[in-house]
Structures are given as structure tokens and as C-alpha cells.
Amino acid sequence: LRSWVNPDCGELCKGTNLTTVYLRTDGPNDTLHYLWDFRGNPSILLALTTPSTSLNISWEDFIARKKNSITFTNEPIYTFGLVINKIIEFNDINDTALINVTNIKHVNTNILHPMFFQWERKTLLQNNEFVSLDMEGNYYNDVPMNISRHGTLKLSLRGFCSLDHSQIMPHMLHTENSTQVDMILDHVETNKTFSSSRFAIELLVVGGGNPEIPMFINSKKNLDDEHTPGIFEVVEVRTPPYKSMDDYQTEGAYLQWRPVSYTNTSRDVTSSTETVQYPALKVTDHTSAIKNSLLYCYYGDKVNDLLTQRIIVSLGMQGDGFYKRTNYSTWTFLVGYGTPPNEKFSYLVIMIIAIGLGIPLVILIAIGIYLCIRKMPKRNRGVYLSQ
């Protein structure tokens, strides 16, 4: 795993608040590229290429947000893009914990665009096994709409080189092909006219493959909650399969998360609430949808021929006191390529199960032997015991 910040930008990026992180993982047959960007709405671009392929960024055009300012020396085998597109505040006056996703411009909703937060890079850790980027967006100021809010939107991105569980609750199982995104809404000022504010996150996703086949959202049950106490479910969003270079149908990209949000920095069971996912929504004007993001710099007008959809996840459940109870909400998800990882029992759980089932089994066998001996005729039993 190799990584760079503002690669080959040079003097142009000095003294600026620009943060574009490039990650590259080289395998024997292909290379996986990730770009994390915070100019405009926070965005992630994933590209699978041949090992000899390199990334090129025309920095002057990229800063000006021009199309085709990001290119690869060879045409990628597969690409996938994601934009953290909107933070939606909605007034849940009936305490249903549900948002009307077909009409988010309703009178009981406010839309915050992450690009209008003042982003600052807090920490960046880089080595051959792990890349960690922590960003903070403070003081929201949307001049065109004359909306300003105090509070902080925190984004932590993690890149990995192995299969393991993240150290951050809810301890998502990641692979070397995935990026983890952890979002925190920390004392974000709410609309003063809303008595029951909740928040929802809208992601904009662009995937390769057949644009007529929609992305599908699937909830899977787990047998244990060892890594995320109280949560026995994983939600997955999969893109349609695509044809690889050898003409085989190949798995595309995925999103994965556990349906839990934490309302306190402790992130334990007592401070957890639920999340709600909704069916993916179509996007009518693909180009304008990605205009304020990294994805426009790569896809440009070509995005009109790609599958582009919106995914909305709301935070909170009935009776949890709304956002105002703690003024703190989190959401953690993975972006990855290939087949999503499946949870397996750890050695500790296997040992506990073995002990739990083994001891009663031994007792039953012992009781069975004892009862068999008791039922034998006395003469035969004496012979048996003497032997």
C-alpha cells in the first residue's frame, strides 16, 4: 500500500488548503487506485487498472474543476465513484424516524451541502499497511442560499492492506480492497423552527456496468454480535456485475455498513440508535449531479452513460429523543471492490460454542452409560464390573 498527498502538485498546492490523497495497491495482475478528495463535496474515486497504469492529474485544471483533469495512462478495467452529496435535516414531528426520500425539498427539510463547510486537515498517517485521514468541516456557510450553521462535520477515511476489523466502532470487517468512511455530526446547529430534528445522509454513486440494471440494497443477518454488540445485521449495496478483460462477468463495487449510529463518543450499546436505508433513487441529470466533486474531473460528460444513483440513509429510531438529545450522531460505512467480506466466528466464539455444547454432551453420555449399567441384571453387572 502506497499513498501520496496532492501527488506532483508542487508549488501550486503550497499554502493552499487542498487535500487530495492518492492510494495505490499493486497486485500481480492488476492495480487498485483510490482518490480521496475534499475540494467541493467530499468524494472517492476507485479505479481498477493493469499494473503498468499510472494516474495523471492536471492540477491547474483540477483546481478549476475542469473535466478530464484526472486521467490514467491506460483505460481502467473498472471504475466506481462516490460523493457525500447532502446532509439532510428533517423535522420528524411524528417521531417515525423516516424521511420522505421522494420529496426531500419539502417544507420540513433543510439541505446542507458538505462543500460549504470550512474543511481542515487534522491528521494524516501513512505507512505501507495503513493510511488514515481525519478531516473537520467547521462553520457551514452557504452564501447563495444565505444559510449558516455552527457545528462540526467530521470525516475519517481509512485505507488498509489486509483483512481485519476496524478499531473504530462498529468494527467493520474490511479488506485490502476497501476504504472505510466514518462520519460524525458533532453539535451541528439545527433549524430553530424544527422541534424534532433528525439527519439523513445522501450519497451519490457512479458505477460501471450496465446503467439499466439498478444497484440493489440487501440486509444480511449475522449469527453473532461479537464485534458490534447488539447488532446482528449488515447492509450491502452492490453494483451490477461487469465484463472483465477476459469476457467473464465480474463483481463490481459495493458499499457496506451496520445499521447503527452512535449518539456519544463512547460508542457503546447504551449510546446506540438505528439507521434506516431506503431504495436507491435514479438521477436525471448525471453531469450536473457530479459537477461539484472529484468525479466530474474524471468522468466529465461520460457519466451520462453510466449508472448514477442516490442512496439515502437516515440516522435515528423512534423514541430515541431526536438529534437534540445529545447533538451527536455517527455513521460508518465501507466502499470496496469485489465481493464484500463475510463475518466468520472467531476462535473465541468457536471455543465458547464448543464448551457450551461439549460439556452437556459429555454429561449426557455419562448419564447414558450409568443408566445402562443400572439396568443390567445383577449377575451380569458383577461380571462386567469385575472385568
Image (cartoon, helix red, strand yellow):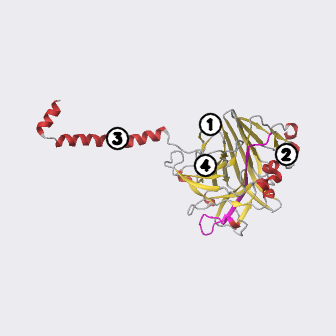
Alpha-carbon span between mark 2 and mark 4:
39 Å
Q: Amino acid at mark 2?
A: Ser
Q: Which residue is mark 2?
A: 69
Q: Earlier in the sequence, mark 1 or mark 3?
A: 1
Q: Is residue 357 visible?
A: yes
Q: Which residue is mark 3?
A: 359
Count the marks: how many?
4
Residue 124 among those drawn in magenta: no
Q: Horizontal and vertical percent for residue 380?
A: 13, 36
Q: Amino acid at mark 1?
A: Ser
Q: Horizontally, is 370 left or right of 95 in the view? A: left
| Quadrant in the picture for residue 99 | bottom right
Q: Which residue is mark 1?
A: 162
Q: Amino acid at mark 4?
A: Thr
Quadrant of the drawing holding the N terminus: top right
Quadrant of the drawing holding the C terminus: top left
Q: In the image as oriented, which residue stretches furthest toward the front?
A: 247
Q: Residues within 10 Å of mark 4 (few under 14, many from 20)?
A: few
Q: Residues within 10 Å of mark 2 (few under 14, many from 20)?
A: many
Q: Horizontal and vertical percent for residue 122?
A: 73, 42
